[in-house]
Amino acid sequence: MTHLRDFMSIGPTISDFDFDAKRRAGPGRTATPPNPRKSAFTLIELLVVIAIIGVLASLTVGLSSVASRKSKESRVRAELDQLATAIDNYKAALGTYPPDNPGMPSTNQLFYELSGTLYEQAGGRGYFSTPGGQERIPADAVRTIFNARGFGNSVRPGDSLKFTEEFKPTEYGEISGEIDVEVLVVPVKGPDRFTYRNVTAPLAIPVRGNPKTKLNPWLYDASSPIRNNRKSFDLWTEVVIGRNIVRFSNWEKDPVVVGRAP
């Protein structure tokens, strides 16, 4: 019977391999295994990779631009619908739509009409203030700025308003002038001028204390014979999206490109 030690002795051992490698290497040399061939990118492969990266980058920029445009459109449309609903609720409560500023749709009194105002006299002068007292405007300024004798949605202190709407600080802004006057504003930048039924008029209003910064006010018309919604009101805005001037309105279902941004 073959013993296990006899079986294990058959064939070369590890030391035999080491000796054989040293013998081939020759005296004074150390045997080293052959190096495998190192792989590397060719010039063509590098150019292909660079081209692919460029295509992916352009797609990313394009998708980002589309996402930004869609975000602006959604925000403007949402605020337009919200404001139009508030105006309808105002009419349901008071029996008429909020008055406008005849011939000046960009400088309108919607903020005060929808917020509601309290009228009081102090020092022989009348003042209108919002319910929380955050905003206050002299009565004589209402005639000068809004071409109105007062506000339709106003009561004396102690009486209850028939309707009131709250606005976030980002939804209104102070216009430039000697008197602190607020207007409702659009959350997206607008052009310097707007076109309404083929009539072009100034749009952007300087911010009080910083004339270089311009507000983009909501445009409102509830009385002129040229308005689109003859039985109700026109509410709209023009904003800059990309290279276009886009109009959002309550008489058009979809936004409409009305010009090119300068």
Image (cartoon, rainbow, N blue to C red):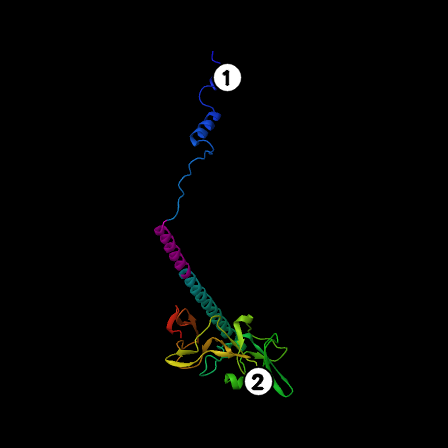
* Lower position in the chain sequence, tag 2 or tag 1: 1
Question: Element under label 1?
Answer: helix
Label 2 CA crowd tier, 10 Å (few <14, some 14–19, many 20+): many
Label 1 CA crowd tier, 10 Å (few <14, some 14–19, many 20+): few
Amino acid on which the number 1 mark rests in the picture: Arg
Q: Residue furthest front?
A: 27
Which residue is identified by label 1? 5
Which residue is identified by label 2? 139
Q: Position of residue 202 (x, y in %)?
A: 44, 81
Q: Position of residue 180 (x, y in %)?
A: 57, 80
Viewer-side residue, 75 vs 233: 75
Q: Residue furthest right?
A: 123
Amino acid on which the number 2 mark rests in the picture: Ala
Mark 2 and mark 1 in contact? Answer it, CB < 8 Å.
no
Instruction: Indicate the quadrant where residue 227 lies.
Output: bottom left
| Count of labels in the image | 2
Gap in angstroms between the C-alphas marked 2 and 1? 117 Å
- Magenta region: which residues? 42-61
Check the image and report above or below for 47 versus 94: above
Q: State the residue at coordinates (46%, 25%).
A: 16
Left or right side of 24 for 109: right
Residue 201 drawn in magenta? no
Left or right side of 66 for 4: right
